[in-house]
Image: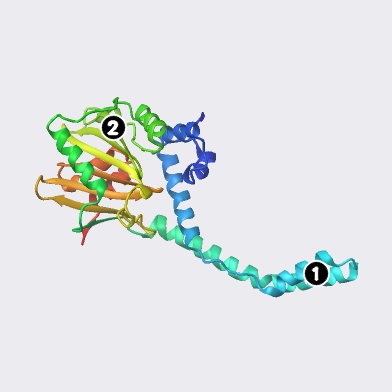
Amino acid sequence: MFRRHASKYLSAFAQSELSNAQASSVAAHLRSCDRCRGELDEIECGISLAKQLPTIAAPPSLYSAIQNLFQSRDLTAAVSSRRFVRRRAWWVAIPAAAAIIAVLGSILWYKKLRDPISVESISRRPTKLETLALDLQMQQRHGLQQLDFTTDDPEALAEWALEKTGLQVHLADQAVEDLQEYKMEGAKFFATASGPILAVFLRIDQVPVTLAAARVDALAKGEAPSQGIWRKKIFYRLDSSSGANLLSWTRDEQTYVFVSELPNLGRAACFVCHTNARRRELIGNAKLGH
């Protein structure tokens, strides 16, 4: 589908405007293309910032002038009206220019100055998705997990998940030297009254890892972690009874949970989605807040 990059499809992909087949192709390309993943991050940042901009109403006199211009049959009156509109146009132009400057400044801050990832320790009651993910992790730990789809190919799993559940999973193709470290085993889906839930089973350094994913609206109100406007938010929980680390986050109207017994809060689980060295460094070094 792409000769080199998927740039022209990324905006539509970020806003879920592509067909399932196109979205699957873009998702597959993103797993192996750092440049397109970077472009997608910038597009999603712009979309998020644009949603925060206030709507500024034009002065009523401007609407009246435009209406009078179209209704008038007198050329002199039309010219006069156009001059009136030009004189009043700055009322709209100045706020619009200020908004554009604010967006550009925010993007500069987003790319260059901010701390892009935060890891926050939480103590609230586990969500439905966290509880399910932890239960599935315990099954995998004892070799009892049941798979609906068996594969070690991230692209094949992403296509199956999209067709079966409508959920998008962005699992990266690992570098050749990392293939022994990251092993995918397969996936299972659950049909619930509120929407499908997907579980992906992996092993990292031979340690079982479970990824659970669902749409935000499949969870009770307030259960899905906040996505974060200015930085990506990852929520951390230690399950004291099992010693498992849980990492939860939200992106693009989907919410996710990683469960593992990996060290350093289980952050290496995130590397199945991120192969970029800089991104891995940011995730690995993000400070744990409370």
What is the total number of numbered labels drawn onto the structure image? 2
Colouring convention used in this rendered image of the protein? rainbow
In the image, what residue occupies the spot 50% across and 58% down? 50
Percent of width and height locating residue 219:
32, 50
In the image, what residue occupies the spot 80% across and 69% down? 68
Helix, strand or loop under label 2: strand
Residue type at tag 1: Asn
Residue type at tag 2: Lys
Disc 2 vs disc 1: which is toward the camera? 2
Viewer-side residue, 275 vs 70: 70
Instruction: Using the image, tell me which numbered label, if any, was put on residue 188.
Output: 2
Percent of width and height locating residue 289:
22, 60
In the image, what residue occupies the spot 18% across and 58% down? 123
State the CA–CA distance, disc 2 to disc 1. 63 Å
Q: Local crowd at mark 1 within 10 Å, few (<14), some, or many (≥20)? A: some
**Above or below, comparing residue 233 to residue 197 in the picture:** below
Instruction: Using the image, tell me which numbered label, if any, was put on residue 236.
Output: none
Q: Quadrant of residue 179?
A: top left
Q: Which residue lies under the disc numbered 1? A: 68
Q: Is residue 171 visible?
A: yes
- Identify the mark nearer the N-term, 2 or 1: 1
Q: In which quarter of the image is residue 162?
A: top left
Helix, strand or loop under label 1: helix
The outermost residue toward the front is: 193
